[in-house]
Amino acid sequence: MSAQQPRRATKPVASHRFADAPLGLLDHHPHELRARHCHDDAFVAIVLEGGYQEAGDEGRFDVRPGDALIHHPFESHLDRVAARGARVLVLDLPAELAANPQVRGRVDDPDTLVRLAACDPRSAAAAFAEQFVALPDRAQDWPDLLAHDLRGGEPIQLGEWAERAGVRAETLSRGFRAAYGCTPKAYRADVRARAALAAIRSGVEALADIAHGLHFTDQAHMTHAVARLSGATPGSWRRGQIDTRLG
C-alpha cells in the first residue's frame, strides 16, 4: 500500500490468516482460481477488464467490466477468473455503503475512479459511492438457492431442503462445494459467525441474547465461532469498540 492510500481501521487482534486486498490496481491471470479465502477488511472491487466468477458468503456472481462487488469484513469467497484474465480496481468501502444489502452493482465511469485512485484514494471511494447502482441478485442454480436460504439465518434441515428442491441428498454437499468451495454446513457456520460479530460490534445487546437470537447452542458456542472467524473473542471485540468510542 502506498503512502497516499488511507490506513484501514485497527482491530483488537492482528490479522493472522486473512487474504490481502491491497488498494489499487490488481491483475488476475487467465483461468486463475483462488480457493475460498477470507478478508478481514471491507473493500470494493471494480472490474476494469476481463471478468471472473465470485462465489461466497453473499452469493455467486459473474462480473464483467463496469461491475462492482462490495465486500464486508470477514467475508469469505472463491474467485474463478475467465479465460481472458481480469483487471480490478480495489477501493476502501465507503461508509455510506457499509450497510447496503445489495453487494453487486454497476458504475458508469470506472476510468474516472482509476484516475482518482492514483492520487487520492479517499476521493475515489467517495466517487464510487456516487456512481454505484445496485443490481438484483440472480440465482444461477440450486446451490445459489441453498446459499440464499442458509444466509437467512433460520435453522435448515439439509435433507428436507434437498427433498423439496429435488436434489439427491448424497449429492447436496458435493454439488454445493463445487459451486462455493465449502460444504453447506461450513457455509452456514461462517454466515452465522459473521452475523454474530456484526451484532457484537454494532450494539450493546447482551452477548447471551445475541447467541440465542442466532440459534447458537449457548454463548460459549458463539464465542468459539466468532474467535474462529475473526481471531478474537466477543469480549475482545466489545472492549475494542468501547475503547474506540472513548478515544
Image (tube, rainbow, N blue to C red):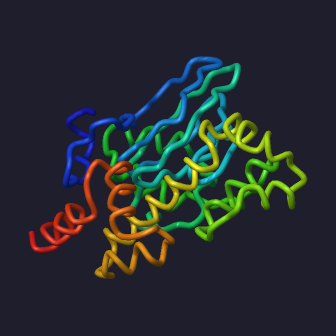
Q: Which residue: 63% across, 17% down?
A: 30
Residue at 67% in and 38% down: 177
Question: Considering only vertical position in the picture, is 86 above or below 127?
Answer: above
Q: Is residue 215 left or right of residue 235?
A: right
In the image, farthest residue toward the right: 166
Up the image or down, 73 lies above or below 180; here it is below
Please provide percent x and percent y for residue 12: 19, 54
Say whether residue 84 is left or right of residue 6: right
> Going by the image, does 216 lie left or right of 13?
right
9, 165: nearer the viewer: 165
Give whichever of 156, 202 is nearer the camera: 156
> Residue at position x 59%, y 20% from top?
32
Give the image location of residue 206, x and y in percent.
31, 81
For residue 4, what is the image quadrant? top left
Q: Is residue 191 left or right of residue 224?
A: right
Looking at this view, is 83 or 2 the one in front? 83
Give the x, y percent position of residue 209. Answer: 38, 80
Quadrant of image for the N terminus = top left
